[in-house]
Amino acid sequence: MRAHWGAIAAADFFTTEVWTWRGLVTFYTVFVIDLATRRVQVLGMTLHPDEAFMRQIVRTLTMADAEPCRVLLCDRDAKWSASVRERLEESGIRVVQTPYQSPNANAYAERFVRSIKEECLDRLIPLGEQHFRRAVTEFVAHYHRERNHQGLENALIEGTPTIAAGRVHRQQRLGGLLNYYRGAA
């Protein structure tokens, strides 16, 4: 499996309750995470994850400028229907489904869901779709550029941490919900 590590990605959904003019609604967010680099790509957010939405997800996932992925690990949720899996297979992506009720079989995706919920979405009440989208976008940027990852030997996904003697400067995202500390020059 290590020989193919760079070609494997995991996909999953998570749900978030968002306050809108219509009251509390549930948004479904689908993402993929590259197992080797831990890079996350949010593929879409919707109120109704129907077949048309999933066709768009397949198009997004198979675009030429997307991260190359030859194997996609996903659960047995009905959203990953036979036609969706078939479209992925036709575009050269082998779909491997985890056993029923086995979240540990998709541990990398489940860990990202836990991170985004515990560090961001459980600590705020998104007021509308735009606020929710901004929160997810800011968290993913924080996840890539400012958050250490134990599985990567406490490295950042993008860039390198700046180590400087002297003062420490705090950078904030989402009004201080997400913080990152850098050495000031």
Image: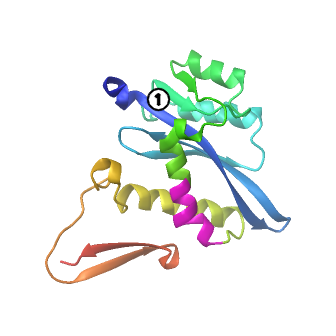
Which residue appears farthest toward the right when viewing the image? 22
Q: Position of residue 115 (x, y in %)?
A: 51, 58
Q: Is residue 86 above or below residue 22?
A: above
Q: Position of residue 96 (x, y in %)?
A: 55, 24
Quadrant of the rendered image containing residue 126: bottom right
- Whether residue 62 is visible: no
- Highlighted magenta segment, given as a residue range: 114-124
Query: How dense is the environment of label 1, judged by Cα within 10 Å: few (below 14), some, or many (20 and up)?
Result: few
Q: Which residue carries the number 1 mark?
A: 64
Q: Is residue 156 above or below residue 13?
A: below
Task: Name the chief secondary structure element in magenta.
Answer: helix
Q: Amino acid at mark 1?
A: Ala
Q: Is residue 148 above or below residue 12?
A: below
Give the SS element for disc 1: loop
Magenta segment: does it hold 121? yes
Q: Position of 146 compared to 139: left or right? A: left
The residue lying toward the viewer, choosing from 117 and 171, is: 117
Q: Position of 33 compared to 167: left or right? A: right
